[in-house]
Amino acid sequence: MVLLRALVLLLALVVSDVHCLPWFIKVSESQGPGTILQFFSFNCSSHIPTLELLHVQPPTTFFNPPRLTRWQGIYVGEVTLSSSARLDALVVNHYELQLRFICGNHVMEGPLSVDVEQDPGHIRCVGRFASPGGEIIQVLETVSPGARLYTLLLPGLELQGAQVSPAGQWGGRMVGGAWGDQ
């Protein structure tokens, strides 16, 4: 693990440089908490530097305050997704993070632009199912497990449907997409 971390930091030093502001990155909406979004390196030999996240536009708690670590005389900054991160490109597909690096009297600010891209394999639930007729499905105890109860055709999917089947011998009803006991 230590060797992997050292290789990642070395890559960050080779690829990133503070002079290439602004930064633009793309991230898949399927990325979750703890995902490292960006590495960048800073040279500050005479002082102990700081790296701050000034603000995020639109406002969100999806991004952790940046971390700054020293490695072989160079400081490496890292921006990660926080534990509250739930990226959804249909809700917000672009975030602008304003970062500030301070080394003694030298202050440098710059944006980190994060574009959230849709993940075609990511299934979204947009809310509870409700048919126009407000259908209620009642399942009697005599219905065998695995029997087809309902076929839902989803828009955009040709000849594919979601089927609702009972998992065992029980009676229940489906109201607006939620199962409950009879």
Image (cartoon, helix red, strand yellow):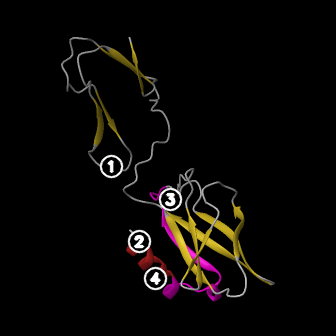
User: Who comes first in sequence, dot 4 or dot 3?
Assistant: 4
The span picked out in magenta is: 13-32
User: Is 9 drawn above or below residue 87 in the view shown?
Assistant: below
Crowdedness of circle 3 by 10 Å Cα count: few (<14), some, many (20+)? Answer: some
Crowdedness of circle 2 by 10 Å Cα count: few (<14), some, many (20+)? Answer: few
- Mark 2 or 3: in front is 2
Task: Report the amino acid beneath label 2.
Answer: Val
Nearer to me, 150 or 41: 41
Find out whether the residues at labels 1 and 2 contact each other: C-beta distance under 8 Å: no
What whole-number distance in Å separates the C-alpha atoms at marks 2 and 3? Answer: 18 Å
Task: Report the amino acid beneath label 1.
Answer: Leu
Q: Secondary structure at mark 1?
A: loop
Q: Secondary structure at mark 4?
A: helix
- Mark 1 or 2: in front is 2
Q: Quadrant of the C terminus?
A: top left
What whole-number distance in Å separates the C-alpha atoms at marks 4 and 3? Answer: 19 Å
Residue tagged 4: 11
User: Who comes first in sequence, dot 2 or dot 3?
Assistant: 2
Residue tagged 3: 34
Residue tagged 2: 2
Task: Report the amino acid beneath label 3.
Answer: Gly
Q: Residue at x 57, y 56 (%)?
A: 82
Q: Quadrant of the N terminus?
A: bottom left
User: Who comes first in sequence, dot 1 or dot 3?
Assistant: 3
Is 170 inside the magenta-drawn segment? Answer: no
- Mark 1 or 4: in front is 4
User: Who comes first in sequence, dot 1 or dot 2?
Assistant: 2
User: Who comes first in sequence, dot 4 or dot 2?
Assistant: 2
Residue tagged 1: 157
User: Is 75 drawn above or below residue 125 in the view shown?
Assistant: below
What whole-number distance in Å separates the C-alpha atoms at marks 1 and 2? Answer: 46 Å
Where is residue 127 shown, x and y percent of the image? Answer: 50, 37
